[in-house]
Amino acid sequence: MEAFVIEGPTRLSGQVTVSGSKNAALPMLFAAILFKDEIKFTNVPRLWDVQTTLKILEEMGCQTQWDKDTGTVSILSSIKSPKAPYELVRQMRASILTLGPLLARCGEAEVSLPGGCAIGARPVNYHLEAMKKMGVDVRVDEGYVRAKVNTFQSSEYVFPQVSVTGTENVMCLAAAISEKTVLQNAAAEPEVVALGEMLVQAGANIEGLGTSTLEIRGSSNLKLENPVAIIADRIEAGTWIAASMITRSPLVIDQCDASHLDTVLSIFRSMGAAIEVSSDLTRLTVSPADSYQPIEIETQPYPGFATDMQAQLMTVACLAEGRSKITESIFENRFMHVAELQRLGASIEVTDRTAYVNGPVQFKGAPLMATDLRASASLVLAGLAATGTTKVSRIYHLDRGYQRLDEKLTALGARVKRISD
Ligand code: EPZ
């Protein structure tokens, strides 16, 4: 296993480039299963999860190429076996996103249930309920989803909770059938919209992208002429704003898409950061403040405050003058970073799904354990501001979702060393 050793306090300086979005890339790469011709992608981030995705596609019989330097991926999906085995699915829950495309392409699929992860049980019942209404026979046994298409039918499904990959999985299947599929309480995340736009370009008719109601009439002859560009990672961009605020360093953040950051920008501005947005929305210039205001926030589906930004916000809140209140409404166990931040000296109490953060504190370096992707990023940022040495173990969580964060931080002047632990 590897760890980061961070010397603090460190000021950052310069500009950082945001990579392609992990949560846009994964569903779009799996959606290549829908196409008989080769599909090309650009701006694909260099992540473990992308590696795992390509491995799963190859297991099924697809041919894949990945030029990590240019960030281009091409996939020729010839499916030999519509199966996603447990050994691979357990490495990455998003593999459930093979289900919709495999059913569209092969009429059947056998996909391991992803199982839970650190932040929650992560069930996929909404995915399966929606597909059943579309005419798919779905059975779950021995930890596998075994699904077979009967006769597709027009359907309407109301998601009991907004589900990002639930919307994506069902949208992929619906995009390939002529029957009409209506999804209510659908996810409106930019990553869902990007996938929808790719399917529209390929010939599907999707009304309502970016709203909570999708009306989809698909086509059995989806075709894509041009390469698909992966959108910028809004969570990485938000993480860099937090980094600037935590280390009190002015920072320029390039190749982002500020149109996906409205709530994040208003929250961090209300805490005291000055953030200038370039006219083409791709560059943020962040100037931190000497003191920050506390905040009251609840994580929500897009366009609300993203759960994937909750840990980073909490780290900033530790430095605010007063008591902040952060409620995690999306996942049942997404406060593992609290205990780790407390080891750095944070003053946080948790009741149910709400954390009360008292600040300001001066972090003091300590050995920490990363628990999930976004939490580990917030621990690294805290380590940058802490006096002394902070070691963050199990940083494989980070490598899953952030492209070489240590290299980007070092280029900004941070003292971060990757060691084997
Ligand atoms: C996606 O996960 C993201 N992952 C997550 O990012 C993100 O935190 C999450 O959406 C919320 O924005 C990818 O896009 C690959 P959900 P997903 O289905 O789709 C419940 C990261 O760090 N639910 O929107 O799995 C579920 O338990 C990751 O990059 C059901 O009960 O999340 C949760 O409470 C972490 N049954 C809520 O809905 C279902 O069938 C939202 O989950 C589906 C979901």
Image: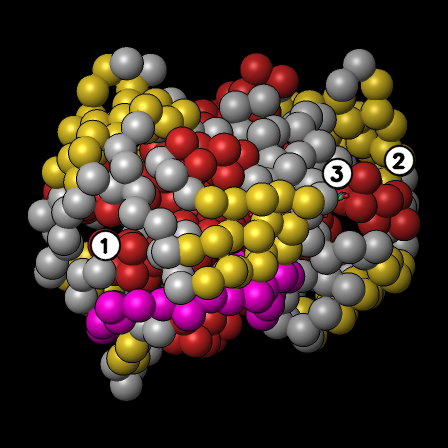
Residue type at numbered disc 3: Val
Determine if the magenta segment contains residue 231.
no
Q: Which quarter shows the C terminus?
A: top left
Q: Residues within 10 Å of mark 3 (few under 14, many from 20)?
A: some
Mark with earlier residue (1, 3): 3
Verify CB contact (< 8 Å) between mark 3 and mark 2.
no
* Residue 48 vs residue 292, the one in the foreground: 292
In what element is the residue under mark 2?
strand
Mark with earlier residue (1, 2): 2
Rendered view: 158 above or below 63: below
Residue type at numbered disc 2: Asp
User: What residue is at 71 percent from the left and 44 percent from the top?
Assistant: 352
Ligand 1: does it lie within 8 Å of the C-beta at label 3?
yes
Residue 137 - label? 2
Report the residue marked by disc 3: 124
Q: CA distance from mark 1 to mark 3?
A: 39 Å
Mark closer to the observer (3, 2): 3
Q: Residues within 10 Å of mark 2 (few under 14, many from 20)?
A: some
Residue 281 picture location, percent across and down: 32, 78
What span is in magenta?
282-306
* Residue 234 sits in quarter: bottom left
Mark with earlier residue (3, 2): 3
**For residue 268, side relative to residue 123 (left or right):** left
Report the residue marked by disc 1: 247
Residue 57 picture location, percent across and down: 50, 30
